[in-house]
Image (cartoon, grey):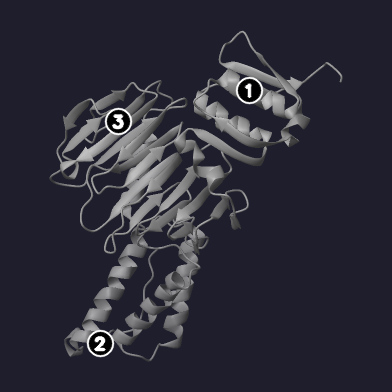
Amino acid sequence: MKRKSNKQQPDPEHLTDEERAAGERAKLLFTTLRNEKFSGSEKEVLWNQVEETISHKKQRSFNTFWISAAASVTLLLLAGVGYLVFYKDSARVMQEFAARGANGPKETQLILADKRVVSLQKENSSVEYKDNGALIQVDSSSTIGQQVAGDQQFNTLIVPYGKRSVLTLADGTRIWLNSGSKLVYPSHFDDRRREVYLEGQAFFSVRHSDDVPFHVYTRDMEVKVLGTEFDVSAYADDSYTSAVLATGSVELTTQPKSLFGSKTTKIVPGTRAVYDQQQATLQTEQVDVKEYVSWKDGYLVLNSAPLTEVLKKLSRYYRVDIILKQPKLADVRFGGTLDLQENIRDILEALSLTTGLIYKQQPNERRYVLEESTIKP
């Protein structure tokens, strides 16, 4: 979008150093705006704001014009109605890496920046970075090396349904990845930023750093912390993204790539924040944290949970299909603790005893059906 001004500009040689610096900052801001992939309506709103500022300042000097116009745009950003114009390029790059990664592999895969693929055979695998990322210990049995010098590069850890993995980064941060999850992260952290991109579910225990915040990006949420413990769930087949805070404090930004829909809020321990993608709303509530993070320790704590949600979690964890035969069963609630160290049949038996339902295994051994009992009491 090109716009011309007929106003004659004053000679830059007569500007003070402060005025020149202000002009340069403003030009940089507008250059950034031009490079952003905004929608047509978003660009029009920004330019309307700039032109409104110009119309009120027509008789002012060159430097005043630039300062006023820049201030108009900056206020849009700082007021919370807009997108963070300087949304980090690394977040976009990591999202692109996630899209390239394999979908639905049978084994957990670690894809290195140099495109090497390391398969992790264990059901509960582990990956630990040492020596500032130059060495990677896999399942406590083998060590591989990688190049960490030069430009920023990214690794990807893909955990399929039926598997779990614990990742320890070079800074000491530990991340538990649940079944059906994908994490993209730098091969090593520099001294300026710590950023990862998540699809699926993960529990984070972030090593504290006052100088370098830790950022977790998902498709529609950014979580910023200095050092704390929290869970993030961002499965592609869920209509929501959620974060549950166990300790410390976090800052959440929903729709971080949106110019006018972005919102930032802080939550305290024991809070669950849920972003509804269809309604574009963020709601918070006080919860029992164990109900949302116990999966990392091998069990599920459930408090009157909808049966559909329970079965979805079990389907991911065990990599099986579980079907409710009668639609009305979706309203059945379940409370109790399920030991995920047991096999799926034992879990379904426990559900049956508690809910009064019965389960049947289909000829396909990885498919089960829950239904009402035909035997009347």
Q: Going by the image, does 183 lie left or right of 323? A: left
Secondary structure type for disc 2: loop
Amino acid type of the residue tagged 3 in the rendering: Leu
Distance between mark 3 and mark 1 Cα atoms:
32 Å
Question: What residue lies at 23% left-to-right and 58% top-to-bottom?
Answer: 192
- For label 1, the crowd category at 10 Å Cα-Cα, with few meaning under 14, some 14 to 19 and many 20 or more, is many
Residue behind mark 3: 110
Amino acid carrying label 2: it is: Pro
* Residue bearing the label numbered 2: 10
Residue 95 can be seen, yes or no:
yes
Q: Amino acid at mark 1?
A: Leu
Q: Which of the 4 image quadrants contains residue 105?
A: top left
Q: CA distance from mark 2 to mark 1?
A: 79 Å
Q: Quadrant of residue 339?
A: top right
- Nearest the eye: 360 or 2: 360
Q: Farthest right residue?
A: 377
In the figure, residue 24 lies in which quadrant?
Answer: bottom left
Checking the image for residue 348, the label placed there is 1
Mark 2 or mark 1: name the one nearer the start of the chain: 2
Q: Quadrant of the C terminus?
A: top right
Q: Position of residue 325 (x, y in %)?
A: 73, 22
